[in-house]
Amino acid sequence: MLLKSAVIACLILLLPVAHPARAGAVVMETIPYGGWPRCIRLSNPDVELVVTTDVGPRIMRYGFKGGQNLFKEFRDQTGKTGGKEWRIYGGHRMWHAPEAQPRSYAPDNDPVQYHWNGVSLCMFQNTEPSTGIAKEMVITLAPTGTHVTVRHTLVNNNLWTIRTAAWAMTTMAQNGRAIFPQEPEKPYPAYLPPARPMTLWHYTDMSDARWTWGRRFIQLQQDPRAKNPEKIALRNSLGWSAYALNGQVFLKRFGYDACADYPDFGCNNATFTNADMIEIESLGPLTDLAPGGKAECTEHWFLFQKEVGKDDEAIERDLLPLVGQTEEGSRPLNPNRAEVMGKETGS
């Protein structure tokens, strides 16, 4: 297709060299990581990211410089490439929703094209042969502080319209605790309509000890000894979720559009856990994509050095001030954008 050819031609001219490149205080460099020879490290004075180019696109590391990786890495899979089987690898990835086998599990085991424009790292996956969908990820690290913006884009390279949503999934390291806000309490009988939609899966066990069902927050503890998986999805109009691990907090911000149709019975936020990890997920709106059409969802990430207590009052005291600090930096959050456009034409 002409559009794909134009993108590839541009990338050939603009591929980054293997030397550090500076944009303000952000450094981009090519490094080996986890057995992959060509990964990209983005760093500023405070935090660093590591992104794969041999497979993916995947963000395998996010953490304070010299500190723990908040993301899970599956060491029996890192460094591998090629093959037709899907591998979780760990880190942060993107899928197309709703979940279906085999569509969602299209392998991302091949090299990706990339372009560093001095501000953002743009990752381009080849079109998936089994789905006709291509994935793009644009990663922007602030010159200082911990703010990362990740824009996820699905491109429909089929000759027909498809219905899907962009789905961003972050695989977190073991032994931490995921925290999700509930919609604000309102008094009865002044407010009669329902609120707080939540979707359960056939294997969800609400009595499992890993869950804490508070009045204002829902929490899910990752437990390496667990024998069964757990999953829920939420309609989260407040647009944030968090993960607390070893005195640090990973805060994820994402959009919500009250007029949009979301997957999983109307949910834009989800979590899944098993003995190996826990995932914190955001979903964009379901969209009918014409050939060449695009669907997007954007996340904003932040890291904090902070212990967070385990009851509702402690979370309000410890975590909500951090959420407030991210309001300005993560605008605009609503809505997630879906583009429907035709193929590029012309000579």
Image (cartoon, rainbow, N blue to C red):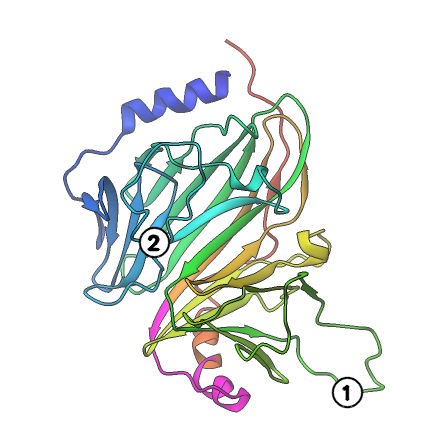
From what the image shows, is residue 250 above or below residue 255?
below
Task: Determine the residue located farthest toward the left in the rendered image.
Answer: 19
- Which residue matches tag 1? 187
Residue occupying the point 45% across, 59% down: 300
Is residue 7 found left or right of 79 in the rendered image? right
Is residue 14 found left or right of 313 in the rendered image? left
Specify the quadrant of the image occupied by residue 275: bottom left
Residue 306 screen position, x and y as percent: 35, 80
Between residues 93 and 326, which one lies in front from this camera angle?
93
Residue occupying the point 68% across, 61% down: 202
How many marks are shown on the rendered structure?
Answer: 2
Q: Is residue 235 visible?
A: yes
Q: Amino acid at mark 1?
A: Pro
Residue 100 screen position, x and y as percent: 62, 43
Residue 31 screen position, x and y as percent: 18, 44
Is residue 55 found left or right of 338 in the rendered image? left
Q: Which mark is residue 74?
A: 2
Specify the quadrant of the image occupied by residue 232: bottom right
Segment colored magenta:
303-319
296 within the magenta span: no
Circle 2 packing at 10 Å, graded few (<14), some (14-19), many (20+), is some
In terms of secondary structure, where does tag 2 sit?
loop
Q: Amino acid at mark 2?
A: Phe
From what the image shows, is residue 111 above or below residue 317?
above
Q: Is residue 29 visible?
A: no
